Amino acid sequence: MVLRSPLHNTHKELGASFTEFAGFEMPLQFSSIKKEHLTVRKSVGIFDVSHMSNIWITGKDAEKLISLTTLEDASRISDEKSQYTAMLKEDGTVIDDTIFMRLGEKFMIIPNAGMSDIVTDWLNKKAEEHNICATAENVSKDYVILAIQGPKSRDTLQKLTDTDLKNVKFFGCQYVDLAGINCIISHTGYTGELGFELQITPPEKAEYVFKKILDAGKEFDIKPIGLGARDTLRLEKCFILAGNEFEDGRTPLEALLSWTIYWDHEFIGKKSLLKQREQGDYERLTYLECMEKGIPRHGCIVQKNGKRVGKITSGTLSPCLNKGIAIAYVSPDNREIDSILDIIIRDKTVKAKVVKPPFVKKDWILTQ
């Protein structure tokens, strides 16, 4: 059965069209993907991302369990801080990429859509195998997750709380009273813009908070944003979508996530990653900007001189650049910046240039 957000009826009232994603029926768009995309880049938008998951990790060894099962040594992360990381199988391939938040003596992990049971079971299995006194509890049904993103996101939320949000630094997290509702706020997001995410419990309080945020953002022309713009926004900034970029089993090294690996601690999959790093002959994510008309999509083949050298994992027409952009796994000897590759789009060859990420720079708005 398809799951729905507690805000489903609110989205219907706002004119949303819906799509199924990872077992959830969620808003695809409210107006148009391009309009919503540019609203976030230029001002502020609000997303319901309740298809994501919430897992509490508690117990005296909670820190130890996080450290064993992710790329990060959790002892390095102080209270009221969050961290982007990934969980691996023994072979080094990614189970899921995630953010965890340290809130006092416990941790909250935010897995991707459809991954809550898998991640919870994995954590509890490893705790038992390694005699770690910690428990993972899937509490996804108890929370609604809202993302408020864009240059005016802080100004919007500041109207609803006495907490000085300038003190919530990048990747900071804490409890806050917002619109009179106690929730968890984190200075994180998936758009590449200034933004915050809220974990609201119980779900019955979310509609009130959602509407209060819409009211607070009226002067900035805030808009509700669907999954369509969420995808184009993240792609312009070269952010990974787990279901695409980790498809068929990929490692953090292949996905260019080596910066997330804290090598000076033991974690599941470390031996496999060390071996792969030493060999060096693996495909890596590469960023391609179309030089000709065409919209690359997931699964398109990448060629060089008629020979296959890679495959597109994510692609779209960039609303900011008005040209095709794509992320692809490409063989290591075909990734040089400014080199030209061919993307096969609907049986046609479209030339594309290898570029440095992100596609849309921080100062894009200044050029408009």
Image (cartoon, rainbow, N blue to C red):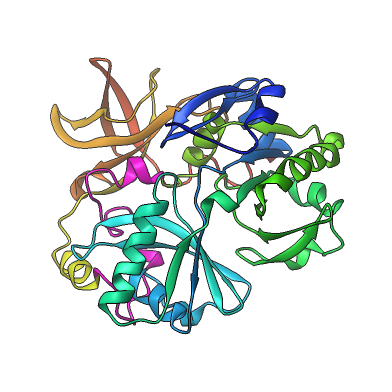
Which residue is rendered at x = 69% and y = 32% of the image?
A: 224
Which part of the image, by quadrant, shows the N terminus? Answer: top left
Residue 193 at x, y percent in the picture = 63, 47
Residue 122 visible here: yes
Residue 351 at x, y percent in the picture = 31, 25
In the image as oriented, which residue stretches furthest toward the top? 347
Nearer to us in this view, 26 or 159? 26
Residue 304 at x, y percent in the picture = 18, 32
Answer with the quarter of the image where residue 274 lies. Answer: bottom left
Answer with the quarter of the image where residue 252 lies. Answer: bottom left
Residue 55 at x, y percent in the picture = 49, 60
Along the horizontal axis of the image, is 100 left or right of 326? right
Highlighted magenta segment, given as a residue range: 241-269
Q: Is residue 266 magenta?
A: yes
Which residue is rendered at x = 45% and y = 28% of the image?
A: 20
Along the horizontal axis of the image, is 33 left or right of 74? right
Nearer to us in this view, 40 or 143? 143
